[in-house]
Amino acid sequence: MAQGEVPLRRTPLYALHVRLGARMVPFAGYEMPLQYPGGIIAEHLHTRAAASLFDVSHMGQIAVRPRTGRVEDAARALEALVPGDIRALAPGRQRYTLLTNDAGGVRDDIMVSHQDDHLAVVVNAATKEADEAHLRAALADSCEVTMLDDRALVALQGPRAEAALAQLAPQVRAMRFMDALPIDIMGTTCLVSRSGYTGEDGFEISIAAERAEAFCEALLRDASVAMAGLGARDTLRLEAGLCLYGTDLDGETTPVEAALEWTIAPARRAGGARAGGFPGAERILDEFANGAPRRRVGLRPQGRAPVRAHAPLFRDGAGTAAIGMVTSGGFGPSLDAPIAMGYVSTSCATLGTPLDAEVRGKRLPVTVGELPFVTPHYKRR
Amino acid sequence: MIKYTTDHEWVRVEGDIGTVGITQFAQEKLGDLVFVELPAVGASYDKGQTACTVESVKAAADIFAPVGGEIVAVNDKVTAEPGIVNTSPMEDGWLFKLRIRNLAELAGLMDEEDYDALEK
């Protein structure tokens, strides 16, 4: 081990991954499964056709407990850090929101759910220590912030997810997209949300670390359920048009640039009941009203060659100055075609705009395309 | 005669024609291939020059000419169906054939025993 290198951490499911033949790779400080023997494409297609189980225990699970015991106090405090409407979050409901910085950039994209006496927050793996410190510092007066290191997090995703999980917990059938409820599974209380990162219906299940492996094995006894790794997770989320923090979103990128205006709740917009009041609100609300100079778009390469992250983008057939850059790109197995997303000058962001991407010194034609690339199958009702 | 490079390519030599592909180890390491860009027939490469590119779901990898020569044939089947390189890297998944300019360059490559023993 090189000097100064931090040893990689393992999730509670490490032994299961190894037993199932996963190829383990370093990711955000953890040894994580990139893929199992079937390979990324098979895992991707299986997720869209049946159900896949992903270990996402590397992500941060944080409890925000109001010192008063009244969850509205935690919601009020958290609203000072995000542009979402947290106070309107009903018990058992979850919301996607953004931790912003003073410059209007995105510190992290997170999930927040109302758990009666506290808010449950799920944050990205690479940012979890920074998020924990940020939340603790900003909410110290009103809330206790606890990283739940003793819990695993698994995602069960795909059209067969409901049937598979319902064998262990029939009440999940009644859940709809973005419900987040405590549910007893195999004798232990789990926090189950009907959400995910694939564009499919599915669940994320927070479970006590020591129960995680037995729970996964129980799910895997269902013939429709198979493990999937980070590789398939990435191709699935790209097809679903979802941002990867650190790649498509960062501290220099605003929510409006990222085409995430919908995360700025009506109550927090200019003229709203609680307008502004989150870090970077001035810039973000100005861009909300007037637009931003660049915008995240979907990109469809015209040929078969994948166009990957960091490829510069140019106006079709002309221009030596790049008008944007690819942030995520690769191959979409469900589309059997290369797909990408990136940021372009707003003047080039219209659907159908022909652009060129530079790959290995060659200009390849790409077209600005609709996000998501595949139709989501969330269970909204 | 079949020879291997430290970049995990193989070259099968018949007369002065070398057929080139990637090894079982390389295809496993790359994972599912989704794109292969082959060289043009007639193009010439020096030993070690990038002759073509293969791309998996996760990454792009350059394929170097294991020895110098002129491309005399390419395997169009792998362009149409890159997965052939995964399922048959040493046979049906060959990439290109070149007319070897200087057979002495082969002496710098590994035989199978040395390649198998290579720290990967």
Image: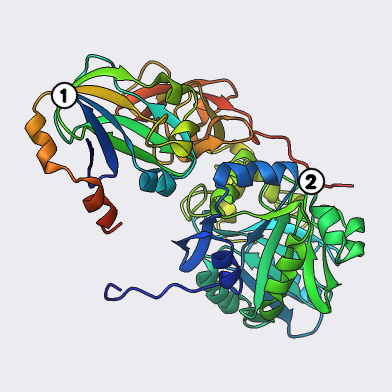
Q: Which residue occupies 73% across, 35% down?
A: A375
CB of mark 1 within 8 Å of CB of mark 2? no
> Which label was assigned to residue A35?
none
Residue A233 percent location from the top left of the image: 60, 50
Which image quadrant: the N terminus of chain A? bottom left
Report the residue marked by disc 2: A159
Q: Is residue A285 above or below residue A239?
A: below
Which of these two is toward me, A369 or B120? B120
Can residue A286 be seen in the rendering of this structure? yes
Residue A209 percent location from the top left of the image: 66, 78
Report the residue marked by disc 1: B69
Residue A204 percent location from the top left of the image: 73, 61
Residue A262 lies in quadrant: top right
Q: Which residue occupies 72% across, 77% down?
A: A211
Q: Which residue occupies 58% across, 20% down?
A: A352
- Compared across the picture, whether A89 is left or right of A33 comes to right
Q: Is residue B90 above or below residue A175?
A: above
Can residue A80 be seen in the rendering of this structure? no
